[in-house]
Amino acid sequence: MGKKLYPDKQHIIELVDGLYQMGLRQVVVCPGSRSAPLTLAFARHGGFQIFTVVDERSAAYMAFGQALSARGTTPVALICTSGTAVLNMGPAVAEAYYLRLPLLLLSADRPAFSIDQLDGQTIRQANIFEAHTVFSSTLPEHGRTNIDLKRSRKLMQEAWSAMIRQQGPAHLNVPLHEPLYELPPFSVRLLTNQPAEQSDFFGNSTQNSTQNLFQNSSQNSTHNVLQNSSPSVASDASHDSTALSNLRDTLRHATRILLVPGQSAPDKQLDDLVSQWLQDPRVVVLMEPVGNLLNGSHSSVTTDFSVSSHPSDSSVSSDTTDSSVTTDSLDSSDTTDSSGSTVSSHPSVYSELDSHKATVCTGRVYRHEDILAQDSAQVRGLRPDAIISWGLQIVGKRTKNWLRRQSETNERNPIGPTRPRHFRLDPLGWAVDPYHNPPELIRLSPYNALHAVTNVMNCERIGGQEAQGLYQHTPTAPTNSQGVPVSNESYQKQWQLQEQKADNMLTPLLNYLPFGDLAAIKEVSRHIGADHAVHLGNSMPIRYWQMLGGSARSWWLHANRGTSGIDGVNSTALGFALSMPERTVWLVTGDLSFAYDINAFSCKERPDNLRIIVINNQGGDIFRLIDGPSRQPECEDLFATPRKIDLLALAGAWGCDTFRATTAFELHTILAHLHTRPAGSGPAVVEVVTEPKSNQIVYQSYQKALLNP
């Protein structure tokens, strides 16, 4: 039994100081008495940025947004009191697990003798998130002895290591005895080890790291994958060499190579490499905007924020918390922009979900997801020989279904007798199969894997290294699986043909939209700079955005597509904006989603760089648009659930700068004004009021144009 050497709760002091040495800097605190020792220790340390949020669910999503802004290289800690407060963190924990973000959950708990003894705020907290964390444990109750302190330190280091190496949340449950407001001073320390070098997800120093939560990195990395880090983890290192050799051999002979990035963070080095791959006419990229690939350096789209460029149809109507805004104060003289940069895209990158050119530059080509639902010889002819996938979730159901159909070998897939060969790039070894085509797993980042096999691609210039003999151009035409030569331009051209057909069908519709959800989001996209970040709600906002993928662009597009529904969207965007004050951060969300997470603004910080667009279509409009619920007589009462909520009063009560638009001109004028708001205005909340019936007509017309050419 260890000798009593230190004051009660000395292990809390050591925990806080140890986490600082590990690299922790941001802590989100939910007020509570049982958690007071943790809260006070972090606050009194002096080395942390502390944020307080009343609602534990919103607080957890805010910490999630902060971890996201760091691309997962540095964990964010979250403190809450005991009882059901802990359960409220669950949605964000699950989202962080499936989007691979490091959150350190520090839950205060009652002593073991209080569990199941009818004490208040007491539940079974130990390992409560075990299924969705990369590490879970409980600290010693007192922390007075050498044994207690060593145990606490060991658990802290294991939790940190798991978050860094396995990309996910960790949970340390902390039982605490009364008195709760008496702490030993920080001058009493047991730790004698040197400050730990801050590490990224792969155990490399972040001083030279460009890695992120979605594995888009050019750095060679080694990592230690533990078996509880995912539903299925490959652990045979020798398999990687074999799979890489198989990929190289497949690329030598394939005539139809499809790159499928899932949700990912921006990565310029990967962009540059994929751009070079696209010089090979056998290669096509099938991508959603949340893939964040090739969205920053290639187009002639320019930004025009001038009020006079938009047809006038009425005067502006705005409600403000701190000031009165009218059309006189929002004239064209106030419409300047600092982000009128240009963006572009390669003509063989096909944006997922119904993307359309709209106002984009000449030569950009997009893919319309609904076309893939057509049963035509032309669509079946898009079947690839090889699929290379990476990243996280795919939003579009039709895209996933189309990819899944490619593994079928029947009369509906006449090209070759075998399914496309599927290679999955994932440095953590998550052996997932979202396309029902069991992949050969390569445990390398996308950059490292693609870089390793570039020498077999038909690229005349790759990274300027052709003079070194690393890459070579192969002018001869490749062959298919039967050894028959095929034109190496055919695959890109087939996709381009289908895209052009869709563009021709949709141009009249999308160029003359009546005011509604789609027209509003199209207008918002025109005011977003190429260096801005955009967060999207999970129901119709992300789908509308992808329908306009041709004109919509940003530095980083994000949606909580791991597991979340409408919860946490305000909090995630707020956390992201607080951590990146140099960036403008937009959130496009719906009325119910906004109201659902209104407690995000219980955080006292009011970042000026956050702009929230609330599409108020009086309920969950997605249920009025999709086939199943829209056909039910109970749709309005049980699914759409419209609520009469004064959203601007709700936002204004939390100190937001509020506006309302009911026409296209009002919206255009307000958006132009947002670029010139004075410092200290706080988050801008723009309510855009639309009519559900008009949205239905536009959406149905859109679907009809694609599915009935």
Image (cartoon, grey):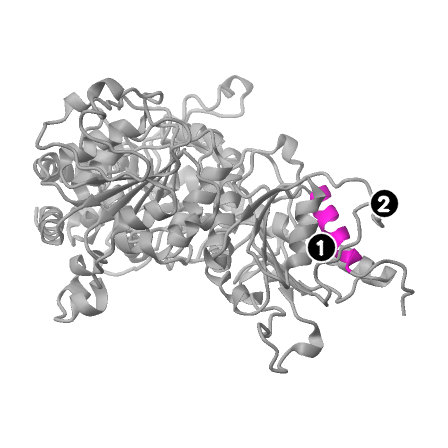
- The residue depicted at 22 percent of the width and 60 percent of the height is 643
- Identify the secondary structure beneath mark 2: loop
Q: Can you say whether 126 is above or below 78 in the image?
A: below
| Residue 154 locus on image (x, y percent) | 76, 56
| Residue 465 locus on image (x, y percent) | 52, 20
| Residue 92 locus on image (x, y percent) | 48, 57
Q: Nearer the viewer, residue 31 or 547?
A: 31
Mark toward the start of the polypeptide (1 vs 2): 1
In three-dimensional space, the C-alpha distance between marks 1 and 2, rounded to whole angstroms, equals 15 Å
The amino acid type found where label 2 is placed reads Thr
**Residue 346 visible in the current orientation:** no
| Residue 384 locus on image (x, y percent) | 32, 46
Query: How many discs mark residues in the rendered view?
Result: 2
Q: Which residue is mark 1?
A: 156
Residue range corresponding to the magenta coloring: 9-21
Q: Can you say whether 199 is above or below 126 in the image?
A: above
Quadrant of the frame with the N terminus:
bottom right
Q: Residues within 10 Å of mark 2 (few under 14, many from 20)?
A: few
Tell me the number on the disc at residue 147. Answer: none
Q: Which residue is mark 2?
A: 192
The amino acid type found where label 1 is placed reads Met
Query: Does the segment drawn in magenta span residue 267?
Result: no
Q: Nearer the viewer, residue 605 or 423?
A: 605
Query: Does the segment drawn in magenta span residue 15?
Result: yes
**Residue 23 visible in the current orientation:** yes
Q: Nearer the viewer, residue 309 or 194?
A: 309
- Identify the secondary structure beneath mark 1: helix
- The residue depicted at 66 percent of the width and 39 percent of the height is 204
